[in-house]
Image (cartoon, helix red, strand yellow):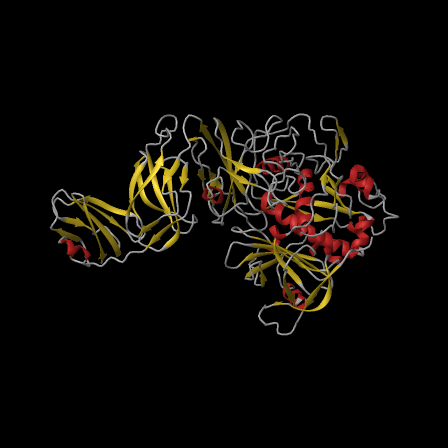
Amino acid sequence: MKKVLSFALISVSLAGFAQNGKLWKKTTISNKSAVEESKQFLKNPSLYALDYTALKNTLQGAPKSTEYVKSKIIVSFPDSNGEFEDFRIYEKSNFEPALQAKYTDIRSYVGESVFGNSKIYFSVSPLGLSTMEMHSDKTMDIIEPYATDLSSYVVFKRTDDKGIAKEFECKLPNTVKGNSQNADSKSADDGLLRTYRLALSCTGEYGAWAGSVANALARMNTTMTRVNGVFENEFAIHMNLIAEEENIIFTNSSTDPYSPASTGASGAWNDELKAVLMGTTYGIGDAKYDIGHLFGRSGGGGSAGCIGCVCNSTNAYNSTYQWYDHKGQGFTSPGSGAPSGDNFDIDYVAHEIGHQFGGWHTFTHGAEGNPSQMEPGSGSTIMGYAGITSKDVQPHSDAYFHSASIRDITNYMKSTAGNCGVNTATGNAAPVANAGADYTIPKSTPFALTGSATDANGDALTYDWEQFDLQNSTTANPTATKTSGVNFRSYLPTTSPTRYFPNMTTVLAGSLFTVGTELNVEYLPNVARTLNFRLTVRDNKTGGGANAYDDMKVTVNAASGPFKVTVPNTAVTYAGASTQTVTWDVASTTAAPVNCANVDILISTDGGTTWSALATSVPNDGSESVILPNIDTTTARIMVKANGNIFFDVSDANFTITKTELAVNDVNKKSVQVYPNPVKDVLNVSNVSSTSSYEIFNAAGQVVSRGTLATGKVLVNQLTKGVYFINIDDNGTVVKTKFVKQ
C-alpha cells in the first residue's frame, strides 16, 4: 500500500550537542523533509534533533527492570513546555528472551523521574525513538519521529493530538444479554506483576506498510511499550511478544491468511486469527500464548471477539453473549491514517486488549445493558468511545481506565479463568483509600469531595473521584432533572484528593453544567436523587502499580437549595484590610436533612486557584462581616462553604482589593493608644471604654484572635512572629492599626 506523505520545512543542525547527556537540540527551518503520516495534523510543532547514537550508547548500560537495582543511567527528555526532566532508566523488554536475543536493536525502556513523580516509557529501534511520559499533575507528553528520515522529533501533549478518530468502530456485539457484574469488586492490590504471552500477528497490508518483518516488529514494540505502560500502571499486567512472532508477521496481502480489510475488519479477522494461532501451520498452537491479537492497516474496526477470554483455549460458543470464548481472536485496524501513534495505541489497541482482559464498554451514548456503562456520552477513558460518536465528551481517550474497568479487569485477571500468566512478586503494597462519610446536600449547589489515603511504601499517590452509577436504557445525557444514571464525567487522576463538582472553572463561570465536545458532561441535579461516588487511589509504581478504592454517596435534597453567595457578586473594588459584609441565600440548608448550622467563609486572591479562610464556623444565617486581606488583586473571589458538609458556592465575578498603607501611629490621631510596638507578650490598649472589643488578623486577612478590652490588655504571646492588624470597636467607632509580634 502506498504511503501518504506531506512535506514541511525542517532544519536539523546536529552541531553543538553538549556533553554529559545533553542529547537534544532545537531544530531550525532550512530544508524539506518528509513528515510522518501520523504527525501531519500538528500545528506549530516543537521540534528537536536527537543524537540517537549517543542515546543508544548510553542505554547499553541500563539494568533490566527485573534486576531490582538502582540504575545509574540518567537520560534527560524534553516535555511539551520546553523543559527537560532527568529519568533513571531501566530496560523493560516487550519480547520473550529468544525474540529479544535475535532483535537486539529493538528495545523498550522505562524511566523514573530523578526529582519528581513522572514516568517515561519509550522504545528504540532503527525506526527511531518513541516515548510516553506520564505525569501525576498534568497531561501526558509524547515524543515521536517527525521527519521520516529521523532528522527531527516532535514533542507534544497527548491532548494536542487531533488525529482522526471518527472512522473507527469497536465491533463487539452492541447488545449484551445478561449482567455479569461481580459484587466482589477488586483492585490491583496483591503485589503481583502478571506477565502474559502475546501472539501479535499482522495483515499483509500492515507488514507492507512497515516495510519488513523487522520494521513490523519495531512498530509493534512501540505500540506495546505504551499499552504495557498503561496496563502496568493500572493493573500490574505486562505482555511479552512470543518467540515465534516472525511466523505470524505477514508482509504480502496477496499471500497472507487474512481477508481484505473490507471484510476482515467487519469480523472475519476474528475467526481467521484463531485459525492462524490455534493450528500448527505457522508453528504456534494454543500452548504457546495466552492472548492473541492482530494489527491491520485499514478498515476502521476493532474487535476483541469476546470479553474476558485471555487464557481460554476452549473456543466454545457462548450463546448468551453471541461470541466464541477464545483467547486468540482480537484485532485492531485504523479507519484512516497510519496504524501507529498514541491515538492508535491508546484509543484503539488498549481498548480492544482491555476487552480481552474482561473490560466492558463504559460509554452511555447507546444502551448495551452491560455492568459498566458509567460515563456520559462517548466517555473519556480507555473503554469508552471518545471521539467516534455523535455524543463525544472529548476527541480522544485519556490514558487510564475508569474505576468500573479496573473492577472488571482485576476481577478477571484474579479469577481462575484469567490467571494463566507468570506471577512475580513486586514488593509493592497497595494504598489504603478513604472516601469519607456520606452527605446530604441542597439541590443545584456545587460540592467538593475530599478523600485521603495512606501507602506503606511512601509512594506518591494520585486520586480519582468518579461517579459510580450505572446508566440504563431510560436515562440520557447529564441533565439537571435526571434521577438516576451518570451526571458527571471522569477526569484524569491528580495529586489532589479533592474534586469539585462541577469543575472549578464551571463554578467560577457561574454555571451549573460543564460543556463537552457534543454534550454537557457535568450537571448539578435540581431534583431529589442519590449520587454514588468511588475514590480510586493509585500509587503509580514503576514495574507494577497498585490501587485501592472506597465508596461514598451524596443525597440531593430537593426541598433545599440552591445555596448561593449574593454579595459580593459583581466587579466591585474594596480597600485592603476593610470590613465587608458577605451575604448568601441559606435556602433552607439549616433544616433537616441538610442540617448545616455553620459555614466557613474563604477568599481566593488568584481567581479561584487557592483559597484561605476569612472566618470559620460562623452561623449559617446568610450574613457575616469579614476583614479583607491588605493586598492588591483584581481576581478576588469569595466562597461560602458548609462547615461539616461538602456543599459551597462562589461569588459570580472577580472583585478588586486595593492595598491600604496603615501607619502604626494612625490610631494615635484618634487618641487610642496601642503599645508596646513591637510587642512580645501583652499588648496594651488605652483610651477606650471597658465595653470595647477587638479582632486581630494576620497578613492573609484571617482572624487569629478576638475578645473584649475590659482590662485594656490583649494577650498575644500565642501568636507567631510577624505583622498583624488589630481592629478596635469602641462603641461603634472602629479604629485600626498594625503591630509587630516579636
Q: Is residue 741 left or right of residue 284?
A: left
Q: Note whether 311 is above or below 71 in the view shown.
A: above
Q: Is residue 742 left or right of residue 30?
A: left
Q: Note whether 452 is above or below 532 in the view shown.
A: below
Q: Is residue 290 visible?
A: no
Where residue 647 sits in the image (x, y, percent)? Answer: 41, 36
Out of 526 and 536, give the one closest to the viewer. 526
Count of residue discs: 0
Farthest residue to the bottom: give it. Answer: 15
Farthest residue to the right: give it. Answer: 254
Q: Is residue 611 visible?
A: yes
- Point 40% across, 38% down: residue: 648
State the image quarter where residue 111 is shown: bottom right
Out of 260 and 91, give the one closest to the viewer. 260
State the image quarter where residue 516 is shown: top right
Where residue 221 sits in the image (x, y, percent)? Answer: 71, 53
Q: Note whether 164 is above or below 14 in the view shown.
A: above
Where residue 84 sits in the image (x, y, percent)? Answer: 55, 62
- Point 66% across, 25% down: residue: 178
Out of 283 and 233, give the one closest to the viewer. 233
Out of 310 and 534, give the one closest to the viewer. 534
Q: Is residue 691 left or right of residue 604?
A: left
- Point 52% across, 28% down: residue: 481
The C terminus, quarter of image? bottom left
Where residue 667 sits in the image (x, y, percent)? Answer: 17, 55
